């Protein structure tokens, strides 16, 4: 408890200086309910149950990070019930969760009494609720960060640690043609996706790890190569059409898919984009989007988790033990990317809008969940 009070006291002036006049001279205080809004709909907190989207999987991890202390080797939060900073008090699947402070948490009781999590909130509504002080913490899509800041919202942005990529579905003729896969990859203008669709919130991705983690991401090209893509398309004797599926409920995937279709057409190829329901079963498409949040800042562990998730989809296998040496990590990553079965597109950060009551907020660390245990609530501005 003393350690948390001391650490919070040391950081509060720095963290809150950007929020205008605050209670920087006061000590952190206990009490209150932290109001949180997210876009995902989480139907179950049990890792054994499947999820419809990557967004749901990430949100389930975030909620479970409040209830448990550790992760299993597979990345799921585990532990004895009640080992985390909070305990589950109310659960309405797909709608709402309430967690209350764990008085016996080994690192000390959280400052807030409880956290109320509203699910399934549209991005527009989340942003409005932050502006009107009806929410304290709200997820903001990366492409909305700039607009939110311009409207005076206090914004927190993490390192870019969520990969958006395309995976080709084995067994389909277009997907099984390596020339088609390479042509599409070379056609894509990743920089334009970051600059225009994401409003410069993110980074082009050429590999399966970001530069800050691996130190070798710059060795994987992210440049568009329309001329070479056109040459490859021209050598394909059969149809040059690829069907790309995107999550019907994900406006970012739709915008990126439509941009890719334009890029492919300019290079002499053809991409048809189709909206799909991820929970509806089989996908009638040659390729589809995946969104993967890094499970660890350690590049070897992060790559191993990535392969474990994507391997069954694209037929890639790897040694279950994480590669330890930088050269091993790079070689493994290069071997996967060079098949073009997985086409990395962009890296996204996690972004949150913060209400005027939130104090001592810490940017979420890669591989960690929500930092609500150290947050306390002050008076609104």
Image: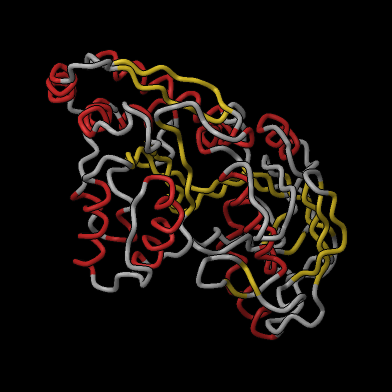
Query: Is 54 placed above or below 302 here?
Result: above
The structure residue drawn at horizontal position 16% and vertical position 19%, both measured from the top left corner, is 230
**Image side of residue 74 versus residue 218, left or right:** right
Counting from the top left corner in percent of width and height, residue 127 is at 68, 35
Q: Position of residue 3 (x, y in %)?
A: 64, 84
| Residue at position x 60%, y 40% in the image | 140
The residue sitting at the right extreme is: 90
**Hey, which quadrant is residue 258 in on the image?**
top left
Colour scheme in the image?
A: secondary structure
Horizontally, residue 369 falls left or right of residue 188, namely right
Question: Who is closer to the viewer here, 91 or 357?
Answer: 91
Q: Position of residue 238 (x, y in %)?
A: 23, 16
Give how far across and how far down residue 107 sits, in percent. Answer: 68, 82
Q: Residue 372 occupies which quadrant of the picture?
A: bottom right
* Residue at (55% x, 58% y) in the render: 363
Question: Which residue is depicted at the point 71% across and 48% down?
Answer: 42
Q: Which quadrant of the rendered structure holds the N terminus? A: bottom right
Question: Viewed as shown, does residue 297 lie left or right of 39?
Answer: left
Count the numbered circles shown.
Answer: 0
């Amino acid at each position: 408890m003393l350690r948390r009070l001391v650490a919070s006291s040391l950081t509060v002036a720095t963290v809150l200086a950007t929020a205008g006049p605050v209670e920087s001279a006061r000590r952190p205080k206990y009490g209150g309910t932290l109001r949180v809004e997210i876009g995902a709909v989480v139907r179950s907190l049990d890792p054994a149950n499947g999820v419809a989207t990557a967004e749901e999987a990430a949100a389930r991890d975030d909620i479970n990070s409040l209830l448990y202390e550790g992760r299993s080797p597979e990345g799921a939060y585990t532990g004895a019930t009640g080992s985390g900073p909070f305990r589950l008090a109310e659960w309405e699947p797909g709608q709402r969760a309430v967690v209350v402070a764990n008085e016996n948490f080994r690192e000390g009781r959280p400052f807030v009494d409880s956290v109320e999590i509203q699910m399934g909130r549209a991005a527009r509504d989340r942003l409005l609720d932050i502006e009107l002080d009806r929410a304290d913490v709200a997820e903001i899509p990366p492409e909305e960060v700039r607009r939110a800041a311009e409207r005076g919202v206090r914004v927190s942005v993490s390192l870019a640690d969520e990969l958006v990529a395309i995976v080709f579905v084995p067994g389909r003729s277009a997907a099984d043609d390596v020339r088609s896969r390479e042509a599409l990859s070379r056609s894509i203008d990743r920089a334009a996706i970051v600059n225009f669709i994401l409003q410069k919130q993110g980074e082009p991705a050429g590999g399966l790890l970001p530069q800050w983690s691996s130190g070798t991401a710059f060795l994987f090209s992210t440049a568009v190569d329309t001329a070479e893509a056109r040459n490859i398309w021209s050598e394909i004797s059969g149809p040059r059409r690829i069907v790309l599926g995107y999550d019907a409920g994900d406006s970012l995937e739709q915008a990126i898919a439509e941009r890719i279709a334009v890029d492919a057409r300019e290079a002499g190829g053809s991409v048809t984009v189709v909206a799909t329901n991820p929970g509806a079963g089989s996908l009638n498409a040659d390729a589809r989007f995946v969104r993967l949040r890094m499970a660890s800042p350690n590049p070897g562990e992060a790559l191993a988790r990535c392969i474990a998730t994507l391997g069954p989809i694209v037929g890639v296998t790897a040694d279950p033990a994480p590669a330890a040496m930088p050269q091993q990590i790079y070689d493994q990553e290069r071997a996967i990317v060079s098949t073009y079965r997985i086409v990395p597109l962009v890296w996204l950060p996690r972004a949150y809008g913060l209400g005027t009551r939130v104090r001592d907020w810490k940017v979420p660390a890669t591989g960690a969940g929500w930092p609500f245990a150290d947050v306390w609530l002050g008076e609104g501005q």
